[in-house]
Image: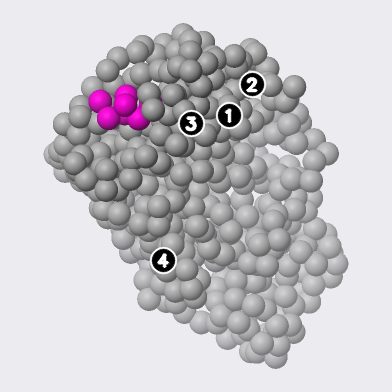
């Protein structure tokens, strides 16, 4: 791949690697436009973010972007023609996983030279970026109750507790009518425990109905949780039903607020920051601006001892070999491939999902032809450093640097797993626009292009479109993102928080049957 992190983009089209047989239109290119430097004229209109052939491409020949295969010509493509899913076919191809071939140990900054932020230190040694009280349901049957309890604590009622960011409800659609044992129940329980134990949570109230499969007692036993003044439980059938449970829950939270408010921010190392890396509504600029810029920020964070969590397994398919080559050990690389094969050979066989080729309509309109091209950009969010660990969904993330967590590509489900694993920030890139938020972890939205940023400026935090406009480099925007990490981690309000987002985005992965 071409290292363009220190170069500003110029000209009507962008060639990302000298081996590429396509370029990306920086702005709308009309048919008949002379492409400077390539001695060709565009045959077709190419919207911004779409690809144009810069030489004749024979039928069956690989289409190369960043010198990486993003598909194969389904017909003869003449120089100057637009290249998209009408003339690109998705095909499987052999990849060399080259375990650890490109591994280079990360050089950490000395502890005294690392950046800091103002965070909440917890008893287990982790630091939070927020201080919430969590109301957690074990089953959908207690969903209304947990939401009603949380809704009672309005901004006005929280005025006496300035060190508490809010009372947040975490309800879901699971907990009963599911397998009693095995991975589906284990996954749900570790997801719930990850939120209960999260560094952004100062206290938690866990509420069940009483007859569900995911029992409060079973959850606490399996996850080694212990009741305390900051971790309480309630069972609705024992409390007397809906109204009495809401009243009892409100009373319990009022008591917990007193202790939670005693926590204050203090200066802590940036090594405590764990960022969940997300993308949604990707477009043809995602791999040129926001994703590599976020990757540059993750590279900086890793040098300061922090962690970037790449996920969305279906959205690295086709470029997974670029990650296994950077794995710190063969075992780490092989675990990533084992998760890929589970998706391809077990979970998604014969299903019309993106890992099997076709991306969403929004991605296609944005200029992405298939999952191979989307994955090329998606993987860049993890930066260029060594792959230090691979985690199952919602497993506690204990390694620093660049790591991977196996999750679906659906953003709320993926981010829920990352947050359960300990992510205390989420960074979300988008080309089409994102209106995502996720309590108790603030979300930072990164726009790939300037028009969308201005159109959705109330939702988007940072405009990475400066890179496409030629006004900034990937490296410069990466530094801007890293600095924003520190600002938001210290209590700065993200756009999603200003809009009150995150009340309904807790979505544990439902992988088992519903019975």
Q: Earlier in the sequence, mark 1 or mark 2?
A: 1
Q: What is the number of the mark on residue 140?
A: 1
Residue at image coords 65%, 56%: 373
Name the quadrant containing residue 441: top left
Q: Nearer the viewer, mark 4 or mark 2?
A: 2
Query: What range is drawn magenta here?
Result: 249-255
Q: What is the number of the mark on residue 458?
A: 4
**Place of residue 238 in the rendered image (x, y in percent of width and height, measured from the top left):** 48, 13
Q: Earlier in the sequence, mark 3 or mark 2?
A: 3
Q: CA distance from mark 1 to mark 4?
A: 32 Å
Colour mode of the rendering: one colour
* SS for dot 2: loop
State left or right for residue 442 relative to residue 492.
right
Q: CA distance from mark 4 to mark 3?
A: 31 Å
Local packing at callout 3 (Cα closer than 10 Å; few below 14, some 14-19, many 20+) is many
Q: CA distance from mark 1 to mark 3?
A: 10 Å
**Place of residue 77 in the rendered image (x, y in percent of width and height, measured from the top left):** 80, 72
State left or right for residue 143 relative to residue 511.
left
Q: Nearer the viewer, mark 3 or mark 2?
A: 3
Q: What is the number of the mark on residue 413?
A: none
Along the viewing direction, whichever of 36 and 360 lies nearer the viewer:
360
Q: Is residue 366 above or below residue 514?
A: below
Q: Which residue is mark 3?
A: 145
Q: Nearer the viewer, mark 1 or mark 3?
A: 3
* SS for dot 4: loop
Q: Which residue is mark 2?
A: 176
State left or right for residue 418 relative to residue 228.
right
Determine whether label 1 and label 2 are within 8 Å by CB.
Answer: yes
Residue at image coords 66%, 46%: 318
């Amino acid at each position: 791949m071409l290292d363009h992190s220190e170069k500003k983009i110029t000209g009507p089209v962008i060639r990302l690697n000298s081996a590429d047989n396509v370029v990306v239109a920086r702005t709308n290119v009309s048919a008949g436009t002379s492409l400077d430097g390539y001695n060709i004229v565009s045959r077709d209109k190419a919207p911004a973010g779409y690809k144009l052939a810069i030489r004749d491409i024979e039928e069956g020949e690989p289409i190369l972007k960043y010198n990486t295969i993003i598909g194969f010509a389904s017909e003869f493509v003449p120089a100057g023609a637009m290249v998209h899913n009408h003339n690109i076919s998705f095909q499987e191809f052999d990849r060399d996983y080259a375990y650890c071939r490109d591994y280079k140990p990360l050089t950490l900054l000395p502890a005294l030279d690392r950046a800091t932020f103002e965070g909440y230190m917890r008893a287990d040694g982790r630091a939070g970026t927020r201080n919430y009280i969590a109301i957690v349901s074990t089953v959908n049957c207690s969903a209304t109750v947990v939401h009603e309890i949380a809704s009672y604590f309005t901004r006005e009622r929280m005025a006496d507790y300035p060190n508490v960011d809010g009372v947040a409800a975490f309800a879901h659609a699971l907990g009963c009518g599911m397998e009693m044992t095995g991975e589906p129940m284990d996954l749900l329980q570790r997801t719930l425990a990850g939120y209960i134990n999260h560094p952004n949570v100062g206290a938690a109230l866990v509420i069940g109905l009483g007859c569900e499969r995911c029992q409060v007692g079973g959850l606490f036993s399996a996850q080694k949780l212990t009741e305390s003044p900051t971790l309480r439980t309630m069972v609705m059938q024992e409390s007397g039903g809906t109204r009495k449970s809401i009243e009892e829950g409100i009373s319990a939270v009022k008591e917990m607020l007193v202790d939670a408010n005693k926590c204050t921010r203090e200066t802590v190392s940036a090594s405590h920051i764990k960022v969940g890396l997300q993308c949604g509504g990707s477009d043809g600029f995602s791999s040129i601006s926001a994703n590599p810029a976020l990757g540059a920020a993750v590279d900086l964070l890793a040098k300061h001892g922090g962690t970037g969590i790449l996920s969305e397994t279906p959205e690295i398919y086709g470029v997974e070999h670029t990650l296994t080559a950077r794995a710190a050990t063969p075992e780490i690389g092989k675990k990533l491939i084992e998760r890929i094969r589970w998706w391809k050979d077990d979970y998604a066989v014969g299903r019309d999902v993106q890992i099997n080729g076709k991306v969403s309509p929004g991605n296609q309109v944005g200029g992405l032809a298939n999952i191979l091209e989307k994955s090329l950009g998606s993987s860049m969010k993890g930066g260029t450093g060594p792959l230090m660990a691979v985690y199952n969904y919602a497993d506690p993330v204990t390694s620093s640097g660049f790591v991977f967590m196996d999750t679906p590509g659906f953003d709320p489900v993926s981010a829920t797993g990352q947050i359960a694993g300990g992510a205390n920030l989420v960074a979300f890139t988008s080309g089409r626009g994102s209106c995502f938020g996720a309590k108790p972890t603030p979300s930072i939205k990164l726009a790939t292009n300037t028009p969308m940023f201005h159109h959705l400026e109330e939702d988007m935090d940072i405009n990475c479109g400066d890179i496409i406009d030629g006004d900034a480099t990937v490296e410069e925007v990466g530094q801007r993102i890293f600095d924003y990490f520190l600002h938001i981690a210290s209590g700065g309000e993200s756009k999603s928080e200003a809009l009150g987002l995150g009340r309904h985005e807790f979505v544990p992965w439902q992988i088992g049957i519903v019975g």
